[in-house]
Amino acid sequence: MLQIIHCTVNGKEQEIAIDPRESLCDMLHNRLYLTSVKRGCEVGECGACTVLVDGKAIDSCIYLALWAEGRHVLTVEGLQGPNGELNPIQQAFIDEAAVQCGFCIPGVIMSAVEIAGTGKKYTREEIRKLISGHLCRCTGYQNITNAVEKAVNLLADKAAMKKEK
Amino acid sequence: MYDIEKITVVKTVQEAVQALTADPSAVIIAGGSDVLIKIRAGKLAGCRLISIREIPELHGITMEKDGTICIRPLTVFSEVAENTIVREHIPVLAYAVDQVGGPQIRNIGTIGGNISNGVTSADSASTLCALNAEVEITGPAKDGSGLAVRRVPILQYYVKAGKVCLGPGEICTGIRIYKKDYEGYCGYYFKYGKRNAMEIATLGCSVVAKIKNNTLEDIRLAFGVAGPVPMRCTHTEEAVRGMKIGETLYKKLAEEITNDVNPRDSWRASRDFRIQLARTMPVRSLQALVRNAAEGKKGGSNAKVGLI
């Protein structure tokens, strides 16, 4: 039996009919057609389904859709500017050639959004720890780490400059 | 789609106890990083769930007037690791929960679920044992009206592998750590696994000790995966308590451990290897703890990257 839930997805208030047995990943991918949310391992190991719920990165495959009631969900589709401009984090992935097959990338980008949200700078080792919940089947970790490091530190600089002003 | 027969969402402890009393075979789900995986694997397929994660009173960490730290069970690992009370008074717990799974898991997994699923490899469990934590359990009152609260030491909370002492209608509603058990103590958590992230401990070791005048005034040593449930090494603790810090102490520590631990063979590691680890890890942990204490650091772990 379907159940109605209310939540904000990528800044837009939504009223969605869900099956209480489905995961948030199923809901975002199959009902809202947000195909950046990838269904990978389905046991919370690979991080391909990572989205932000109230600003926190979670594996949406092991998060029931009904738990999203009243919450804010953010996926890669919600990162673009009003005219489709890329977010600086997305741009960093292009600049650093961090994308190979691309399956893991939307998840890593969402973790990067959470990390950048702190406004702090991180060392390379810290970045590696903060994105350790993602698996890349192409083993493209070096460039992915380069991209996250670049984006996070760039946004930290911007935040610091804003503060000074 | 998960194979769930029915899911009941409760918003208060009262509702949770009522729902659980009405359906004793229902499974409680909090963070879901354990239960949903068991459903997916078929072990809990077709179960009826009671979702307690929306109970506001079961979130957060507070310090009571007498210095008792009360961690509510639905507090997720990342919140425990970032909490100022935990970092200031029992940083070893922050270090321990910072080693659970990966960042996304630490944003959903709860500390109450970590101990209540009765799993010996739980990263928080050995440290909570070393901190003499007490578990607060709420269930139906005997006369059938209202709620009854009882407290058990965490070592008694564990009954056997995968089983804790929650009776019919009972849920875990708090984890309490007393001032006498943390004041003046330092701690160190050592997790042995093959990877730095997304790993289940081959062996986990938590040492909480008080060092004064170069003497080991008190020590509490706990292991995960050294037996079917998290355990304390009381023989070893007694044997080394009061000794001077030095090689004699470390040698004695490694010798005595074998009287306390009884690990198993599993696909992750053999019994012999776990015994070797059990002899080595407490020594290295205590050595690190002594070094940290000299620098005025109250907590630490073997993680490559510590708390951020």
Image (spheres, coloured by chain):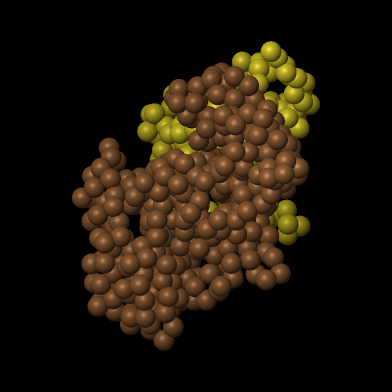
A33 lies left or right of B120: right
Label tally: 0
> Which quadrant of the rendered structure holds the N terminus of chain B?
top right
Q: Residue at x 62, y 42 (%)?
A: B170
* Residue B240 percent across, percent down from the top left: 32, 74
* Residue B114 percent across, percent down from the top left: 51, 45
Q: Residue furthest top?
A: A1
* Residue B105 percent across, percent down from the top left: 52, 40
Q: Residue furthest bottom?
A: B213
Q: State the image quarter where residue B217 is shown.
A: bottom left
Q: State the image quarter where residue B207 is shown.
A: bottom left
* Residue A103 percent across, percent down from the top left: 48, 25
Q: Residue furthest left?
A: B272
The residue lying toward the viewer, choosing from B295 and A150, is: B295
B172 lies left or right of B264: right
Let me know if residue A90 appears in the view.
Answer: no
Vertical placement of B181 versus B81: above or below? below
Q: Which chain, by letter, is yellow? A: A
The residue lying toward the viewer, choosing from B133 and A22, is: B133
B223 lies left or right of A77: left
B161 lies left or right of B252: right
Vertical placement of A56 versus B298: above or below? above
Let me know if residue B295 appears in the view.
Answer: yes
Q: Residue at x 47, y 29 (%)?
A: B38
Q: Residue at x 73, y 53 (%)?
A: A162
Chain B: colour as depicted: brown
Q: Residue at x 40, y 56 (%)?
A: B231
